[in-house]
Image: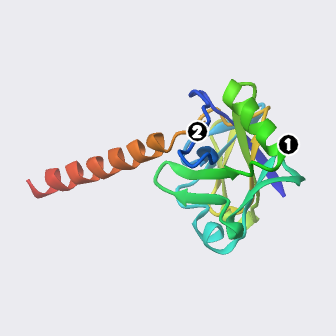
Amino acid sequence: MEMRTANFKSEFRTREEETGEKIIAGYFIVYNQQTELWHNFFEEIASGACTKSLNLNDVRALYNHDSNFVLGRKSAGTLMLKEDSYGVYGEIKINPNDSEAVNIYERVKRGDIDGCSFGFYSEYEHEEYIKLTDDISKCIIKEADVREVSVCPFPAYPQTQISARKQDFERRQDFEKRKNELKERLRNG
């Protein structure tokens, strides 16, 4: 399994619902933005690359890719993942009886942890390699078999964002809707 980490440039805040439920939320995967995996080699996740696996897989939310440290799970209803034109947004409901999970929530709340990551499988037939220059190449992942998303301290994708406020997600959804409506009006004159 390949793992990609993401650095969140926006503030990484936590949210506590009126019910007392603690939530960590944000974008675990961003589409159509490249990142340098190593010197002169870039990668980009294509729009919709995760659609199939998000519908089929029982994705887990982990801490730092550690399968012994499960924060949430799609089938348990403690991890919600939703895809939009920007990428894959997720919300993890933290178990208040799990002291390790609460500790991670508190580290995120304090700003000590501000990254996320995802683990996936990709097959050669779902990748496109582009030679940008003689010594610089880029791979575009067209289909990613996502198995896990992780909250982690050392991210690599600087474009991914995570926050603990659902309002951020709703604002993005509203922006996308307004943008599409404007495009439609411009097309119809």
| Number of dots carrying numbers | 2
Q: Position of residue 168 (x, y in %)?
A: 46, 40
| Location of mark 1 (residue) | 100
Q: Quadrant of residue 120?
A: bottom right
Of the pair 68 and 34, the residue shown nearer to us: 68
Q: Secondary structure at mark 2?
A: strand
Kindly identify which residue carries mark 2: 15
Residue at position x 62%, y 36% from top?
14
- Give the side of residue 182 with respect to residue 37, left or right: left
* Vertical side of 180 occupied by 117: above or below: above
- At horizontal 79% and vertical 32% (from top left) the residue drawn is 153
Residue 34: name its quadrant: top right
Q: Residue at x 49, y 48 (%)?
A: 86
Percent coordinates x, y for residue 85 in the rendering: 46, 53
Q: Residue at x 66, y 52 (%)?
A: 93
Which callout, 1 or 2, points at the residue further toward the start of the chain? 2
Q: Residues within 10 Å of mark 2 (few under 14, many from 20)?
A: some
Confirm whether residue 17 shows in the render. Answer: yes
The answer for how far apart the CA atoms under marks 1 and 2 are is 17 Å
For numbered disc 1, what is the local secondary structure?
Answer: helix
